[in-house]
Image: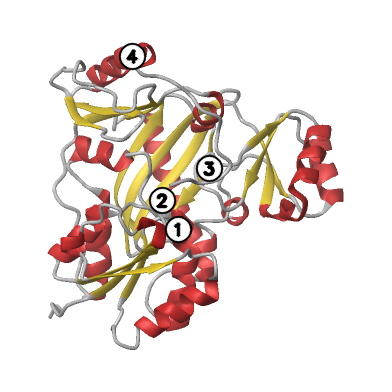
Amino acid sequence: MTNRSPVTVLCLSSFFKGEEFIRECKRLGCRVLLLTREKLRDADWPRDSIDEVYYMPDFERREDVIHAVSYLARSEDIQRMVALDEFDLEIASALREHLRVPGMGETTVRYFRDKLAMRMRAQEEGVAVPEFTPVVNYDRLREYMDAVPPPWVLKPRLSASALGIRKLDDAEQVWRALDELGDRQSFHLLERFIPGDVFHVDSIVWEREVRFAEAHGYVSPPFEVYHGGGLFASRTLERDSPEVREMGELNRDIVRVLGMVRGTLHTEFIRSAADGRFYFLETAARVGGAFIVEMVEAATGVNLWREWARVEVANARKEEYRVPETREDYAGLLISLARQEWPDTSGYDDPEVVWRLRKRQHAGLIVAAPDPARVQQLLESYMRRFREDFYTSLPAAEEAVD
């Protein structure tokens, strides 16, 4: 017998995102609470789907957040806590541990936030990863740089996307970079830079089983786009291709070895141009950013924000979760920084255009079709036109911005 009593869900988000997650929780009959930053008080949250909103100056002072949510729990029977942004995964896990709310705890969440922890665990279980070393012991660093040829990438262990990543060509550059980091050195790792194509698999996991997965290929590696300028683009891969089958197996391996129980997962792999092998790059227990959710929905009809909410609520009610019926179309996503404050994409009027980005200083759209070749053709054509019509660039940010 299922439990249809209201479930109280606390959503934590230090950035403005997750509106569809919130709406779906409310559609499912939940009591929805939102804890966010004071800076986002005027953001366009779906307030008709939120029962109460609470604000804090920031989420940096862990003990203050624990005190605040513990006080809130005196009057609210909080049954699930969900971090809508990757940067909030640690505080959400700390709150779950402290208040004994079901969900991913602090030990497991490290495997989905800490690039060093996830690499070490994956390597221990036989998953191929680029050669890496912690940035802790200098003798080990010297041994690594003697054994692994450059270039290397110096990566923040707890950043998202390509934030803060630096490509270094020799040992002198490494030591200079570490001097600049000072006491922040140990929050980084050093890894072999592998030229190749980068892919992402976006999936839904229920009771340790991958119930839904879509594989995509970035047109250019995110590192190159973020640091070298360019257009962000991705597209659905042909589902019966050998590369999709191989990444599907690797994605299931990641779920198993890192201990994912339920939720959504965004995982990246690189196929080396030198040896053709797939290497695990990173994963995160969240939906993909940069409007990947909208691309997946355009191709399949599945909205990962909504399904994540359904997974959380089904588990709280001790119900079975089932993925809805899906389409097997193909989609492509294209985003660019724009010279114009509000760029006009109305001239991109092919019938396959199914979504347009409305964001200051950005141009973006999604195309979808039953034929992957048509999606590829449109992406290539639109990328050329975007460069002429909209494209501009800015220096890469070192940390996440609102």
Q: Earlier in the sequence, mark 4 or mark 1?
A: 1
Type of residue at label 3?
A: Phe
Query: Between tags 4 and 2, which lies in front?
Result: 4
Helix, strand or loop for disc 2? helix
Type of residue at label 1?
A: Arg
* Residue bearing mark 1: 256
User: What is the crowding at mark 4: few (fewer than 14 residues within 10 Å), some, or many (at least 20)?
Assistant: some
User: What is the crowding at mark 3: few (fewer than 14 residues within 10 Å), some, or many (at least 20)?
Assistant: many
* Residue bearing mark 2: 252
Relative to 294, is 104 on the left or the right? right
Image coordinates of residue 236 in percent, x first then y, are 30, 31
**Residue 132 vs residue 242, the one in the foreground:** 132
Q: Which residue is found at the position 25% from the left and 52% from the top?
A: 44
Relative to 52, is 278 on the left or the right? right
Q: Are marks 2 and 3 in contact (CB under 8 Å)?
A: no
Residue 264 against residue 238 in the figure, above or below: below
Please tell me the numbered disc located at residue 389. Answer: 4
User: What is the crowding at mark 2: few (fewer than 14 residues within 10 Å), some, or many (at least 20)?
Assistant: some
Please tell me the numbered disc located at residue 280. Answer: 3
Type of residue at label 2?
A: Arg
Residue 130 against residue 30 in the figure, above or below: above
